[in-house]
Amino acid sequence: MILQVTVTEYLPTNVYFYIDEESKHGFIIDPGAEAAKLKKVAEERGFVIEKILLTHGHFDHIAAVNELQAAWGAEIIMQENGKNYAENPNWNLSNQLRKEIILHYVTYLPHNAVITLKDNPDHKLQLIHCPGHTSDGCAFYSEKDGIAFVGDCIFRESYGRTDLPGGDEETLLSHITDRLLTLPQETILLSAHSEETTVEHERKMPWYAGRLK
């Protein structure tokens, strides 16, 4: 089960609950603001959130993490290059806010790591490292459900900006084409700041021309 909740305290950001329907245990992806709203959604639906997954460490993806971790005791998962973003407000851009954000007790995982629920190992996501928007940028992919939570790596008919700390356009485009657009064409891509799209649709975009295998 996938539930999208859009939070708007800073930038409109799509937060996703990815839940095992039988147990109602699951993950939350990119809780970027409005912790009270997200806690209410989980409480009303009976969700038990085991892990908080972050596609990257910008403030609009992490601002609710500390409050949710305290409430749920959930493990925080970031790609292994995420330490600068977790611990440095200049890197996560929260220095632009009234309060600076620092994350503690983070688990850092490498490319291709598999993240599973404790009681249901079939409910799992594969971490796909896709740097270029940030150095820790990643997607979380479910082959079983044919979905990928792609954060700011790729949007519908666009891709993430590359002019912020750790960003590089050539790196992003090469990883999108090599790692995301080689997923099955029917894979649904769920981004943080756009409507959903598919691998098949994005492969038609001209900026990937000449890069696709």
Image (cartoon, grey):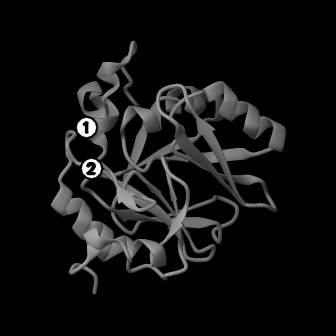
Q: Pointer 1 and pointer 2: residues touching (CB < 8 Å)? A: yes
Which quadrant would the C terminus be assigned to in this image?
A: bottom left
Quadrant in the picture for the N terminus: bottom right
Vertical arrangement, residue 76 with respect to residue 99, above or below: below
The residue at the point 34 percent across, 35 percent down is 86
Farthest residue toward the front? 206
Q: Which amino acid is tagged 2?
A: Asn
Q: Which mark is residue 84?
A: 1
Q: Tell me where residue 44 sits by quadrant.
A: top right
Q: What SS does tag 1 mark?
A: helix
Q: Secondary structure at mark 2?
A: loop
Q: Is residue 172 above or below residue 145?
A: above
Identity of the residue drawn at 48% across and 47% down: 193
* Left or right relative to 26: residue 76: left
Q: Amino acid at mark 1?
A: Asn
Pointer 1: residues within 10 angstroms few (<14), some, or many (20+)? some
Give the label on residue 81, or none.
2
Residue at the (35%, 71%) spot, across then down: 205
Position of 183 with respect to 210 (left or right) is right
Residue 82 picture location, percent across and down: 31, 45
Residue 41 higher or lower than 125, as above or below: above
Q: Is residue 170 depicted above or below 63 in this figure?
A: below
Residue at (21%, 48%) from the top-left corner?
167
Q: What is the CA distance from the residue labelled 1 to the residue labelled 2?
A: 7 Å
Residue occupying the far top of the picture? 98
Dot 2: few (<14), some (14–19), or many (≥20) neighbours within 10 Å? many
- Image position, residue 9 (x, y; %): 53, 25
Total numbered circles = 2
Q: Where residue 161 sits: x, y (%)?
A: 28, 48
Q: Which disc number belongs to residue 165?
A: none
